[in-house]
Amino acid sequence: MKKTIKLAVVAALALGSTSAFATNGAALIGMGAEARGMAGTGIGIAHGAESALTNPALITSVEKTEISFGGTFFMPDVTYQTQGASSESSAADMSMIPEVSLATKINDNFYVGIGMWGTGGMGVDYRDSAATSGTMNMVTNLQLMQFGVPLAYTTNGFSIALTPILQYGSLDIDYFIPQGPNAGEHGMGVAQDLEFGFNIGAAYEMNGITVGAIYKSKIDMEYKGFSKVVNPFMNPGSTYLNDKLSTPAEIGIGASYAFGEHSIALDYKMIQWSDAKGYEDFEWDDQDVVSIGYEYKTTGWAVRAGYNYASSPISEQSGTYNNSVGLNGYTINMFNLLGFPGVVESHYAIGGSYDLNKQTSLDLAFTYAPEVTETYKTSNGGTPYDITAKHSQTGLSAQLNFNF
């Protein structure tokens, strides 16, 4: 069973061979072009079938049956520089993230759906960097995809839903240490895993006001070989034994108000990186994510805009700090900025929809995250020196919707 599902997922992930940089740490700001056109808002505003992962209780907005096919082209721009060396650009600068959603009305109270979504990922590719660049020619690649079956019940304006989740993940980390006791090539190969989780959503609508809440469970993913590529950087006498890199739990609330052809929406959610295995070892902090979106919708077309903010989940650690698993602060700084620089914070979005006919519509969205520059200290055992990462990103989403 797992081998069959992995083959299906590999076919989808093969649409993009580079790593996807997600917006809030390693998590996409929204599922679907409508939500991304409003900077990820979707906990308290319905987006049809694509609401399945954002808030499954809101698939109850589907009139009969809706199918959505789409994807996002992510284009991150990441550079890394070691003090005294030239800046190097990551070659992982484009990725395609697919998604398919279906929701249907069974009767006045029950709705059901099914879908497959690329939900996040991150990575860099410095394999062709100069030997003196300090990048160790590091290549990292994390990709995540979820399959879900949202089940929703609604009555008198109140809706509640459960989405069982099957998550596929793949992770690869490779690098070359030029000198020292651990000199040589280090790599884990592509490790894969399938694990289960769930999402719970609720919503209430009255007089144009909709409020919603969601909980997404933590999913513990195991990537064999992860500990192998961490161990060369452990403190003397310490051994890293963890092969898990969990998808963190999320909790969130949202609200929207529709007046005439206008709607405004506001979401808040917490992404609990500090309790996610693997991320907690590299001192990732929880993220408080706030997004606001606006939609103008009239007969045949709609326009959207939004803003999303979350502080970076990574921060500089002191060289005198040694955490409970045996990682020094300087090592944590290097791994985070070089291999997993999820430092972007602000995200701007615009989007729109156009009805091609009575049954078919097209959604488009464009997102932009301005460049963020972070400089931390690290050391290879001698005098500490600066390392700097710069990261910006753009994304273009497109989606076809069929209603029947």
Image (spheres, helix red, strand yellow):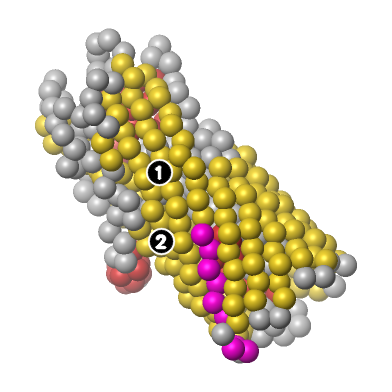
Q: Is residue 253 left or right of residue 359?
A: right
The one nearer the camera, 332 or 236, is 332
Please name the residue shown 37% across and 39% down the image: 340
Q: Is residue 41 above or below residue 104?
A: above
Q: Is residue 321 magenta?
A: no
The one nearer the camera, 200 or 29, is 29
Q: Is residue 240 above or below residue 196?
A: above
Give residue 54's position: percent from left, percent from top. 60, 60
Report which quarter residue 83 is drawn in: top left
Q: Which residue is mark 2?
A: 73
Q: Quadrant of the N terminus?
A: bottom left
Circles 1 and 2: CB atoms closer than 8 Å: no
Please name the residue shown 62% across and 49% down the image: 307
Q: Quadrant of the C terminus?
A: bottom right
Q: Decide if residue 255 is in sight here.
A: yes
Please name the residue shown 76% across and 66% down the image: 262
Q: Amino acid at mark 1?
A: Leu
> Crowding near pointer 2: few (<14 within 10 Å), some, many (20+)?
some
Q: Decide if residue 146 is in sight here.
A: no
The one nearer the camera, 241 or 331, is 331
Q: Is residue 359 magenta?
A: yes
Judged from the image, the secondary structure of the residue bearing numbered disc 1 is loop
Q: Which residue is mark 1?
A: 245
The magenta span reads: 357-366
Marks 1, 2: nearer the viewer: 2
The extreme right residue here reads 207
